[in-house]
Image (cartoon, rainbow, N blue to C red):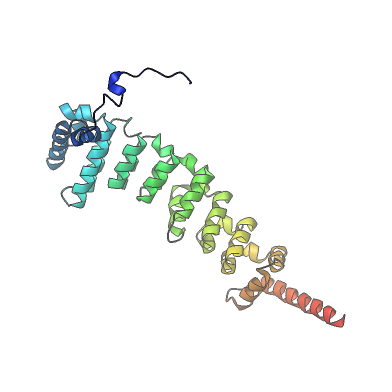
Amino acid sequence: MDQKRSRSPSCDPKHSRSPTPSDDAKRRCGDCSDWKEALEIVLTAIRTGSVDAVSERGLVAKLFGDRKFLIELLDKLDQKQVAGEIEGDSIVAIFREFPEHMRNDKDVVREAVTANADTFEYAGDGVKSDAETVLHALKKDAEMKYMNEDLFYDMDFMEKLVKMQPYGVECLIQDIVDIDERYITQEVALLLVERDPRCLEDLPNTWGDDIDVVKAAILEDISAFRYASEDIHSDSAFVKEMLNTEGIGIKLKEYINFAHDKKGIVKAVVDEFESNADSRADERCDI
């Protein structure tokens, strides 16, 4: 590490020249004339409806192995889509023609889903397992069913996914259930009710009967208690525990007293709680 390599004259600042604007341009896009020609070939294929096998056509075949070109191509196609010159489906069709290793390139896939989220379906298996790339794709409205299922069990990923929901988690829950409700494990259910306690109503029935999930929900919002199962409503030990929990006991008592859907067993527990509270107050007064 301490030995210095001798530098060739071309690497010496004394012998190097300052980069010109044309040098910078070449570094950004390689041979721009080739890029323009290849872009025109792609656009012609789109206009004529002959996208299939466009990646095998001369210059395009060569440049489809160049990640910088593909990123530039996707950006150009996105601009033309915004301008109304091409349809979004054309971008998907072109992306499908990319070599497999390019459909596994994180930067290429990010650019593709930015242009059209439907391209994510045709991304490589490698990027469908990459948490950050998948989160980016989902932010762009890619369909969750195409991501690797292992990510459902990655709690760091799921926590980020839950937090990035701007308007609650109802739609996220539905998306997961549509794939397989078994992906909503207790850990995931806890993340969901902590983000939006009232989503207890939207979760599969299993979680309205789970004491830990219900407790987490009502600790955040007392009104979530109404979405607990009949068994939870009838669990006097659980209700007593919640009534004696600092910070929520009084709120829960008031909620149960005034809720239109209160259950007889729960009301009885509240009455007992209030009676005991009155007795304790009387004892303090006698002292």
49 vs 283, left or right, is left
Q: In front: 212, or 9?
A: 9
In the drawing, does residue 165 fall left or right of residue 212? left
Relative to 253, does residue 107 appear above or below in the rendering?
above
Q: Residue at x 81, y 76 (%)?
A: 280
Count the numbered circles shown: 0
> Residue 228: x, y in percent?
59, 63
Task: Work out whether residue 165 can be spotted.
Answer: yes
Q: Quadrant of residue 64?
A: top left
At a point 63% along the width and 74% down the height, the residue shown is: 256
Q: Quadrant of the C terminus?
A: bottom right
With 2 as the anchor, is 19 left or right in this view?
left
Looking at the image, residue 223 lies above or below residue 46: below
Name the residue: 40% across, 34% down.
Answer: 126
Q: Position of residue 196 (x, y in %)?
A: 51, 61
Residue most extreme to the right: 287
Q: Residue 168, relative to residue 15: is it above or below? A: below
Near-viewer residue (213 or 66): 66
- Across and down, in percent, residue 193 comes to 55, 58
